[in-house]
Amino acid sequence: MESVTGAPVVVGVDTSPRSNDAVELAAAEAALRHRPLRIVHAFLWPLARLAVPPASPYPALDAFRDEARSLLTDAERLAAKTAPGTRITTEIITDLPVPALLAESRHADLLVVGDRGSGGFRGLVVGSVAVQTATHASCPVLIARRRRDAAGPVIVGIDGSAASQRALEFAAREASLQGVDLVAVHAWGLPPTLGAGELVPLAYELAAARDEEERILAESLAGTAQLWPDVRIQRDLHRGAPARALLGWSRRARLIVVGSRGHGGFPGLLLGSVGQHLIHHAACPVAVVRAAP
């Protein structure tokens, strides 16, 4: 059955091997969400680097056009094999990768990119297009990192911020669609009043700090079980670095979800303190969700 109409799942493709992972991941998400799939390739004319206008006749342009069309045809074939019945459209976009994908995100349900790239998405390396789209896209961004564990849970980082609440909503929906558990991870450290070089906190101070972190996690999860009764929710109150906690979970997870900007356990996420670390090192796909404007 063909996917219903609505905002599409958009995936950016290029000539890198990881691009196929992004296409398969995007096709699977489109099928789960009953959304159409849109495959785009940002194409910069090679002559733009020369003192010749792109409109000038030049035989090599036809070869580059043919290569771009062939790339999209192969991606469409792979997507159709991954998600039969999903409505698929393709387009070559004459633009730089980041502006092209950010423009697509304004009308997308989900944007999917690989963590490394080449060809039309030259520069689609960790810290470039993947990070910029995860930071600035208007919709959630899913970065295809390695293969996800089909039986693993969906993991979400919780810190009580607005972005982490949106991430929780996204993660709960994903867990429900995929029929897997949801694990809410909240990392915490020493109370802010206990800086480096001070005395080791007393047991009751640590207990009080833990109680406060448990309250934050419980308040963040309030109502989630009622909204998603089919999802089994586990809690992981982790004392230590959030990046380390989430990386540990990524080795047995189907998906890691974080907000684009956080506080508390996930400070400075917009600048990449945790999000960039996950995009660099996670052993499963990573979704980054922005707070509502």
Image (cartoon, rainbow, N blue to C red):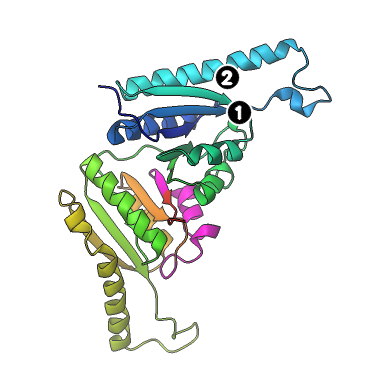
Q: Which residue has dot 1 on it?
A: 120
Q: Position of residue 16 (x, y in %)?
A: 53, 29
Badge 2: residue crowd in 10 Å (few <14, some 14–19, many ≥20): many
Q: CA distance from mark 2 to mark 1?
A: 8 Å
The picture places residue 46, in percent across and down from the top left corner, at 71, 24
In the rendered image of this protein, does residue 101 appear above or below residue 258?
Answer: above
Over which residues does the magenta segment extend?
263-287
* Residue 282 within the magenta-colored segment of the rendering: yes
The disc labelled 1 sits on which kind of residue? Gly
Q: Residue furthest top?
A: 59
Q: Of residues 246 and 22, which is closer to you in this image?
A: 22
Q: Are marks 2 and 1 in contact (CB under 8 Å)?
A: yes
Near-viewer residue (113 or 253): 113
What quarter of the picture does the N terminus occupy? top left
Q: Considering the numbered disc 1 on the image, is that residue within a helix, a strand or a loop?
A: helix
Q: Secondary structure at mark 2?
A: helix
At horizontal 43% and vertical 57% (from top left) the residue drawn is: 291
Q: Is tag 2's residue or tag 1's residue first in the polypeptide sequence? A: 2
Picture quadrant where residue 201 is located: bottom left
Q: Residue at x 60, y 36 (%)?
A: 97
Q: Nearer the viewer, residue 89 or 81?
A: 89
Badge 2 is on which residue? 68
The kind of residue tagged 2 is Ala
